[in-house]
Amino acid sequence: MIKDYSGATSYIGSIVAVLSGLSISDWAAIFGILFGFATLLTNMYYKRKEHQIKLKELELKIEKERGYQRETY
């Protein structure tokens, strides 16, 4: 039972040691990169939705124009 916890404890201890060694500037840089990446993903998501809407509008417009052309013949 003790062997199960010894591996996890050593990994947790090493992670805590690394994280406690970071300065405020390091944390600011890390969070700046994370927020920048989150912003990029958010923008990509909404741009994709916007393009899908515009594509659907264009398809409807083309279909509508084709319908008018068929009626005129």
Image (tube, rainbow, N blue to C red):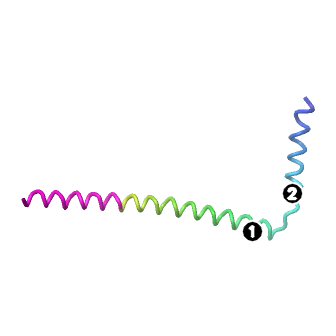
Q: Residue furthest top?
A: 1
Residue drawn where x is 88% and y is 62% of the image: 21
Name which quarter of the figure residue 64 lies in: bottom left
Name which quarter of the figure residue 70 lies in: bottom left
Magenta stretch mostly in which secondary structure? helix
Residue 49 point in image, percent of width and height: 44, 58
Q: Which mark is residue 50?
A: none
Residue drawn where x is 55% and y is 61% of the image: 42
Residue assigned mark 1: 29
Mark 1: few/some/many CA within 10 Å (<14, 14-19, 20+): few
Residue drawn where x is 89% and y is 36% of the image: 5
Instruction: Classify residue 73 as left or right of residue 25.
Output: left
Q: Which mark is residue 18?
A: 2
Instruction: Classify residue 13 as left or right of residue 61.
Output: right
Residue 39 point in image, percent of width and height: 59, 64
For the N terminus, the quadrant is top right
Instruction: Specify start and end residues of the magenta stretch as a single range.
Output: 55-73
Residue drawn where x is 85% and y is 52% of the image: 15
